[in-house]
Amino acid sequence: MVTVVLIVIAGAILAYLSYCPLPSGIAEPWRIRCTNVRHIIPDLVARGAVYLGFADPLSALRNYYSFDKWLVSKFCKDEPSVTFTDTKFDGVSVRIYQPLEKSENPIPAMVYIHGGGWVLGTKDDYHYVVRYIAARLGIVLVNIDYRLSPEYPFPVPMEDCTRATVWFLQNAAADFNVDPTRIALCGDSAGGNLAASTSARLTFDEKYQNMGLPKLKFQGLIYPAMQAVDFLTPSYQQNDITLLSKDLMTKFWSWYLSGDLRHAEAMKTNNHTCRRVRVIQQRLLKHSLVPETFRMEGYNFAPNEESNDSRVCNEIQDTLLNQDFAPLMRENLTGLPPTYIVTAGFDVLRDDGIMYAERLEQAGVPVTWLHYEEGFHGIFTGYNSYNIGNTCMRDFLRHCKENL
Ligand SMILES: *[C@@H]1O[C@H](CO)[C@@H](O)[C@H](O)[C@H]1NC(C)=O
Ligand SMILES: *[C@@H]1O[C@H](CO)[C@@H](O)[C@H](O)[C@H]1NC(C)=O
Ligand SMILES: *[C@@H]1O[C@H](CO)[C@@H](O)[C@H](O)[C@H]1NC(C)=O
């Protein structure tokens, strides 16, 4: 009897701790809640460490994130067909994966830029994901371990990604038996932002054009973060849920922008912008780029016209409008490589991706846009936790097989 009571109490506590409000229509809510159970103890440890002064909130967040990725990786099978080594490309730390079996002919390759809000994540944290991709495709894969914000704000993470990618494009054929005309550049979330700015720089910047680099075969942008001007897009209004909240996303952007959290609070209401920025926003980030069916429930078309806080804006507007910081701020996208773009229905970043896909199409770039209506942020790296994640990963792998 006592045992039963204890089990019921323990169950109730677990259910309480793992509960998070989820919107109706989201895929696999019970799996999301079970994943939350996995987070309870590391979360308590992280909070306890901050509370007791053993760790600052940022390092607690990083350890928590790495622990979770490590835990997930324990449930992944080894990939005996792939070997990997740590090295540096033009001074940037990378891990490179190669098929164990050497091929006679040159093979394709992928450069992968991990997510984590420019703040979290290492090559170790993404090891299980990219090794899985490399094994399924039998290709060479580069996992870039770029330096992170807030210690290294913009442009350092982006410069690291560009430098490693350029070095690889120049040396892949000689050093890794790669066909340099068959290289894709991919990334998820903040990694999608870095992949998009890198491929745009390679396409448009004179410096790189003059190097005569091989063209990227395609870019793969998985629920990318593409702009820091409008935090009142329909999806920011509709999908502010715990899986990736607006609160965390504005912190990530602020850390990346200035190396601190000065702007995070103002960003939440678009109170960090001013007239000059808003004029450009209305041209490049029109809400009408998002199809009407996405703009219905829970969306209020009232961009914040009130704030004229020019002091803050003067300081940051050039970065906000910088097309390498925010790839959606680039005026002319004509000439970019074919693009595979993933968006998820329950994601604050949904409209960043939709707007980019729409503008690429208008610019005549071949676009493959996959929208997972019931999906949420993180499904791609959650390919072994969620059915919808598995589908998302399989669709991506199929696209790579057919296009790389
Ligand atoms: C926007 O910023 C101004 C000036 O700092 C402040 O007075 C105002 O309350 C802010 N508005 C919102 C909605 O936060
Ligand atoms: C902001 O500027 C507009 C015109 O640019 C003006 O009409 C409005 O009163 C200003 N608002 C505030 C809060 O200063
Ligand atoms: C965009 O760039 C392309 C190629 O450089 C050019 O042909 C086109 O005219 C430009 N479009 C606009 C609207 O400026």
Image (cartoon, grey):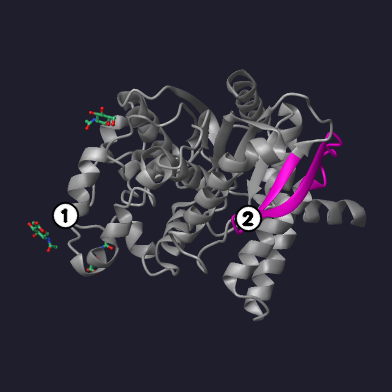
Which quarter holds ligand 1? bottom left
Report the amino acid beneath label 2: Gly
In this rendering, does residue 25 appear at all? no
Residue labelled 1 has its Cβ within 8 Å of some atom of ligand 2:
yes
For residue 77, which numbered disc appears in the image?
A: none
| Real-space Cα separation, disc 2 to disc 1, in angstroms | 35 Å
Residue 79 vertical position relative to residue 37 in the rendered view, above or below: above
**Residue 286, percent from left and from top:** 25, 37
Pick whichever, 327 or 390, lies toward us.
327
Q: How many C-alpha atoms fall within 10 Å of the one at disc 2: few (<14), some, or many (≥20)?
A: many
Is 128 part of what is drawn in magenta?
Answer: no
**Could you tell me which residue is drawn at 35 percent across and 28 percent down?**
358
**Residue 403, percent from left and from top:** 58, 21
In this rendering, does residue 361 appear at all? yes
Per the image, the residue denoted by label 1 is: 275
Residue 218 vertical position relative to residue 162 in the rendered view, above or below: above
Locate residue 149 relative to residue 288 in the image: left or right: right
**Residue 393, percent from left and from top:** 65, 30
Is 88 part of what is drawn in magenta?
Answer: yes
**Could you tell me which residue is drawn at 48 percent across and 53 percent down?**
158
Per the image, the residue denoted by label 2 is: 121
Residue 222 vertical position relative to residue 54 in the rendered view, above or below: above
- The part of the chain drawn in magenta is 73-97
Locate residue 87 relative to residue 157 in the image: left or right: right
Question: Which corner quadrant of the image does residue 353 belong to?
Answer: top left
